[in-house]
Amino acid sequence: MAIAAASQNLVDGILAGSHRAAAKAISLIENDERASEQLIRRLYPQTGNAYTVGLTGPPGAGKSTLVDDIAQIARGDGESVGIIAVDPNSPFSGGAILGDRIRMMRHTVDPDVFIRSMGSRGHLGGLAVATSQARDVLDALGMGYVILETVGVGQSELEVAELADTTVVVLMPGLGDSVQTIKAGIMEIADIFVINKADHPALARTAADLRELLRLDPRQRAWTPPIVKTVATNEDGVHELWQAILKHRRFLEEKGGLKERRRRRLERQVVEIAARRLREEVLVPSTEASGFRRAVQAVTDRRLDPYAAADQLMEEGAKRVAAGS
């Protein structure tokens, strides 16, 4: 009862536009899964209005400065902006750098900008597990745009594409690994490419590599990702980047792609929640039972194959859940 009452108080505050309530809600999401579920259940009917832009790319590419510049331009267009910047956690202390707020100080007194840094908490991708729910909070708060910035390592590029309506991949000249990363699969998720630090001597080579990769892309794409060149430290090219984001949004809305992207996103979210509950209610209790240990030993001794052991695990868990209901 206490959890439900506290959750409803936060919901009321968020829907009234309280940044303090939104900040408390996101902290709750990061720290208390049970309470966050109650919160999102209440907020969800008021979501679905914010447009989500994801920025990803290698560390040091200037993503945080670009986010700061984009927010400034969006505010000039009268848009409210929520920013979720996901920082890596220290594997030793568990603490996150959370330096993005320092780089975005000019927005801290703007009531139409909300900035939140979150630690990835060891999640294999660059996005925190709680990022999707935090995005929903900012959506319900009334932010017109929500910008997600990832740490740009591991699988973060794929994760941000699953959460974003428009995915911006930020690269920088003179970094050989950036082109290698593109070959590894970034081409499939980028809606817009940005070459930041475009005053670097290697700009022409990086741009040429990108254009060649786009030319060799075997898929028939209705949208060809543009290449935008920026120098974020002095806002060169950032207006062009904002216009590219708006153009991609119009394209999705006119072609029905936005609804389809969001439908697929929600489909994945429902499956993920169901899979997590399956693990919690069926698999985890089963792995703690002596029968599971015997099955693992049988697999070790080659008396049972792993698939048969998994079938046993599922059957025992299903029986336990059925008996409990």
Image: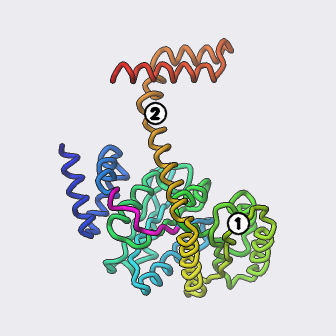
Decide whether residue 46 is among the magenta residues: yes
Residue corresponding to mark 1? 221
Vertical arrangement, residue 303 with respect to residue 262, above or below: above
Residue 312 figure quarter: top right
Residue type at the position of mark 2: Leu
Which residue does the image show at 64% across and 75% down from the upper left? 194
- On the image, the x and y values in percent for residue 82 come to 40, 70
Mark 2, other Cα within 10 Å: few <14 / some 14–19 / many ≥20: some
Which residue does the image show at 47% across and 84% down from the upper left? 73
Residue type at the position of mark 1: Arg
Which residue does the image show at 64% across and 62% down from the upper left? 189
User: Is residue 294 shown left or right of residue 5?
Assistant: right
Camera-nearest label, 1 or 2: 1
Chain part drawn in magenta: 44-53
Decide whether residue 209 is among the magenta residues: no
Quadrant containing the N terminus is top left
- On the image, the x and y values in percent for residue 249 come to 54, 73
Gap in Å between the C-alphas at discs 1 and 2? 37 Å
Vertical arrangement, residue 160 with respect to residue 105, above or below: above
Sequence-wise first label, 1 or 2: 1
Q: Which mark is residue 278?
A: 2
Local secondary structure at mark 2: helix
Taking depth in this image into account, of 311 and 46 the one nearest to the observer is 46
